Amino acid sequence: MKRWAFAGVLLGDQQMIDLVKTADDDTFGENDGVAVGANAGVALFAQVECSEQMYWKKLADHEASGAKTCADPYGYIDGGQEPGESYLGCCLAKNWQYASLAARLLPALRPVWNDEPFHQFVDRYAESGSWTQPDPCAPPDSAACCEGPPHDNHGVTFGPDGQGGCIADTNPGDGVGRAPQTHGQNVNFGYHGDAFGDAMWQAYKDQIPAVCQGDGDCVGDEKCCGGSCALPVCDDDGDCDDQNPITADRCSAPGTCGARCENAAAADGGVDAAADDGGAGDGGPAGDAVEDDGCSCRAGGGGAPQLAWALLLLAWLRRRGARSLRRP
């Protein structure tokens, strides 16, 4: 973990601070654990950059050799052999949650940590669980993978389409995508939890100091969402085109923090059956109510004893012997 960030700030050690602030993705596990999905537009679990073949091999057969934490190569859903579950839930989620809380309660520490997508992922997973929708990709239809015909259907009914994308799911009977039933599951989940850490999260998660108070504090097209700057998931229906012919693509609450893509199977009504909200937000992935300005911002408030709690949490981490998590 980024223990050097805590130590550098608390000890005033500039060498430690610079190391953490400028670290590449391979230096600390957290740096390589989360990435904003190219198609999802939200921070996704994406710990290991695997080949497409390795990704599909583990998705089809969890017992196959290889990493359990492969990122979705298409950037739609949480990574892992069980998207948004598996190794994330067993070994990472709670450790990341507590570290993120401490890093944000101490204002001097947040810019040293220097990874806003990491904090956005922590908040989303704690409040809304796994992210697996919308997803146009067909799931594996057998445990065999990935030699192709006549051994299996990799590259035919599922897997890469040969054009940089995935083969589309054309059977909406069980939902569209690789793991549609998992979306929104695993809220605030994690096996490595601790009563003290959970109590800290509940008491102070709503008192995290905001990086921004309004959109004017952000750059370009970013919005101030939940106290940090982020780009809306979509600005219009065209941003939600999943290249799947059986879905109707719609951007709900376009251009706001609550924006999200809806890719309903056309047989289920698609865009024609969706209520027109005229661009008003109806809550983002984190479930926050969208305010009048279209932004579900959550300004940091209260009087959290930031330094005291950060020191207490640091002492707790040291006491339980927190160690850097190695990739499986």
Image: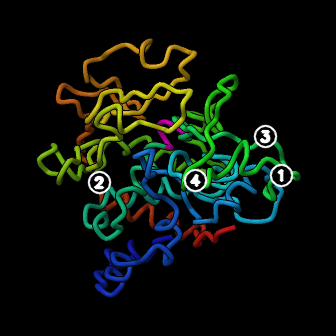
Which three-letter amino acid code belongs to the residue tagged 4?
Asp
The residue sitting at 73% across, 46% down in the picture is 156
Which of the marked residues, 3 or 4, is nearer the chain's N terminus? 4
Which three-letter amino acid code belongs to the residue tagged 1?
Pro
CB under 8 Å between discs 3 and 1: no
Which three-letter amino acid code belongs to the residue tagged 2?
Pro
Q: Which residue is mark 2?
A: 305
* Spatial CA span between label 3 and label 1: 13 Å
* Spatial CA span between label 4 and label 1: 23 Å
Q: Nearer the viewer, mark 2 or mark 4?
A: 4
| Residue numbers of the magenta segment | 125-129
* Spatial CA span between label 3 and label 2: 53 Å
Which of the marked residues, 3 or 2, is nearer the chain's N terminus? 3
Instruction: Give the image location of residue 282, x and y in percent.
Output: 34, 23
The residue sitting at 29% across, 54% down in the picture is 305
CB under 8 Å between discs 3 and 4: no
Neighbourhood count class around disc 1 (C-alpha, 10 Å): few under 14, some 14–19, many 20 upward? few
